Amino acid sequence: MSGAAASPTAVEALLRRERLLYLAAPLTAATLAWVWLVPAALDMYGSMSGLSMWMMAAHWDLRYGALILLMWTVMMAAMMLPSLAPALLLYGGICRSDTAGGPPALRVYAFAAGYMLAWAAFSAAATLLQWQLFQRGLLNPMMELSDARISSAALILAGVFQWTPLKRSCLSRCRSPAGFISENWRRGAGGGLRLGFHYGLFCLGCCWALMAVLFVCGIMNLAFIVLISILVALEKSTPWGVAAARLIGASLIASGVYSLAFTG
């Protein structure tokens, strides 16, 4: 009787350890990203004598561009990896049942890496946009758009996107990882990498406009980085995520119209 009673407990303990293993590397990476991001962002709006000092460059070169790309990639890891946790646990559970596909933890990490590859691509695009805005004198030293009309237009466009069919379609995939994984299943670590990248593209399609708002509010503005991270998690992980996306869109449109009318 005692052995039979202990068996479910042992299985539950094993499952808990496996879940912790699945999340260990991605959440450690997210934590380390926040450990750098928070003091760097505070320094950006403080003395500018510490982690953000290098950001105040008078011109762009290859080294500076590479550092900006790294900055964006670290930001995306901090903002997006925590909201990936439910999908990683779900994928890990499926991999555990697919014994022929290789170690589940390795496949989960490959999935997370593929996901971050999609956001690294976004980081590269954001870096190129930041460079172009800098070249045209449209970005001030605090990494904010300096033209109020462009800022207003960016807010309005981001808000409108929140109401589009593309937003709804991408958000639906992000909110339903089980359906996405079952429809696009691939075996092995390589399959996990491709699957994670594919899933990341849908999350990118869902969230890129919110990330673009950072150009208006300040790329290294910690308050807005945290706020956008919360909004992303709200859209992806709560029962009212679709309604939240529309409410966020309406708020962005209202902010853009107000800015255009009264400060533009």
Image: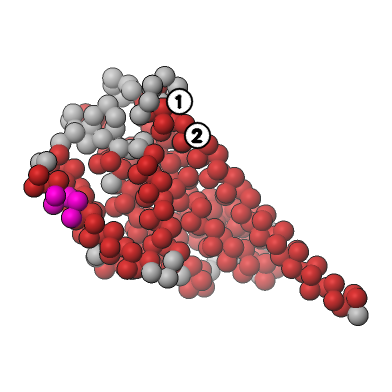
Quadrant, the C terminus: top left
Mark number displayed over residue 91: none
Q: Residue at x 48, y 56 (%)?
A: 83
Q: Is residue 116 above or below residue 17?
A: above
Residue 257 within the segment the image draws in magenta:
yes
Q: Is residue 253 above or below residue 36?
A: below
Q: How many marks?
A: 2
Tell me the CA gap for discs 1 and 2.
8 Å
Residue 262 within the segment the image draws in magenta:
no
Q: Main secondary structure of the magenta part?
A: helix
In front of the other: 184 or 29? 29
Q: Quadrant of residue 163?
A: bottom left
Left or right of 48, for residue 188: right
Where does residue 214 sit, x and y in percent of width and height? 31, 43
Where does residue 232 sit, x and y in percent of width and height? 39, 56
Quadrant, the N terminus: bottom right
Label 1 with label 2: CB-CB less than 8 Å: yes
Left or right of 192, for residue 254: left
Left or right of 87, for residue 53: left
Q: Which stretch appears magenta?
A: 254-258
Q: Residue at x 55, y 39 (%)?
A: 32
Check disc 1 and report the residue beneath it.
51
Residue 193 seen in the current view? no
Residue type for callout 2: Trp
Say what secondary structure mark 1 lies in.
loop
